[in-house]
Image (tube, helix red, strand yellow):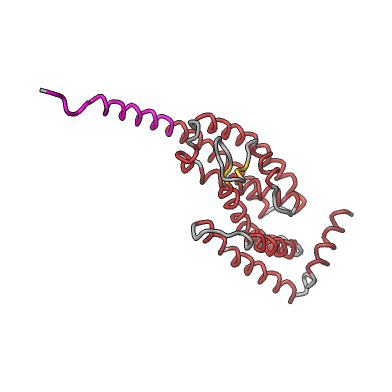
Amino acid sequence: MSITVDLGFFDAIQASMEAEATVKDSIRASVRELDRTNRNITAVLNRVHSSPKEQVPALCTQARIYFSDIQTHISELAGMVPVNQYYKYNGLWSAPMQQACFLATLCTYLETERLITVEELEGFFAVKVDLDNNITDFRISIEEFLHGVVSLTNELSRLAVNAVTSGDFSRPVRIGKFLKELYSGFQLLNLKNDTLRKRFDGIKYDIKKVEEIIYDLTVRKLVVANVETAIEEDASVSEA
């Protein structure tokens, strides 16, 4: 009687499935470490909401220490991903990578009050950002980067509220100007109707929230109405 089904075929499939499961388990273990480091950085940077502005540089310096750990985690991940199979496993680390991009973006803003550059982001993580959609090795995808930037807008609207509480009335004005410029930049992108597009649409609500704060401060004569004047005055105080 001839054999119609070669059981060795299924043995090969089982071996392949077990190998893939092993890779996924290793990646998940490394991702858990990445997520843990993200939480440590978040815990440090969250203190800017309740700290005087003079303490912000020290908090950023403290947060930067943890980014060397993120570089280690990313390096480990890169070594686990099989060649040319980045997209097959990307979903395992995409969310914590978006969070890491947000934290680097927030840290840079708190230090400089401007948007992080691609080169600076690459410096935080010691890995390239994929700008040409041609990933052959481990990279930070442009979507992960943009998700991090969108997360910044929500955090800054929260910071604007807490800045007023701590008596820093000029910060909401500067945040408002930054968010409007950022929103204008996003409008240049032809985003698809996906999660990133929906999150981008939410930026205008963060801007509205900050504008209401600025309006209230202006009515109470706690800040000048002219944005550029407020920024120049704050800069002169910083230089003094």
Q: Position of residue 26 (x, y in %)?
A: 46, 31
Q: Residue at x 16, y 25 (%)?
A: 3
Q: Is residue 54 magenta?
A: no
Q: Residue at x 73, y 71 (%)?
A: 217
Q: Position of residue 68 (x, y in %)?
A: 65, 34
User: Is 8 rendered above or below residue 50?
Assistant: above
Farthest front residue? 2
Q: Quadrant of residue 50?
A: bottom right
Q: Position of residue 80 (x, y in %)?
A: 50, 30
Q: Is residue 10 magenta?
A: yes
Q: Which residues are magenta?
A: 2-24
Farthest left residue? 1
User: Is 173 rendered above or below residue 139?
Assistant: below
Which quadrant holds the C terminus?
bottom right
Farthest top residue? 1
Count of labels shown?
Answer: 0
Q: Quadrant of residue 155?
A: bottom right
Q: Position of residue 181 (x, y in %)?
A: 70, 62
Assign the magenta stretch its main secondary structure: helix
Q: Nearer the viewer, residue 228 or 164?
A: 228
Q: Residue at x 62, y 53 (%)?
A: 149
Q: Quadrant of residue 127?
A: top right
Q: Nearer the viewer, residue 76 or 43?
A: 76
Q: Is residue 98 left or right of 2 when viewed as pictured?
A: right
User: Is 213 rendered above or below residue 150?
Assistant: below
Q: Residue at x 50, y 34 (%)?
A: 84
Farthest bottom residue? 219
Q: Is residue 227 left or right of 71 when viewed as pictured?
A: right
Which quadrant holds the N terminus?
top left
User: Is 220 rendered above or below residue 177?
Assistant: below
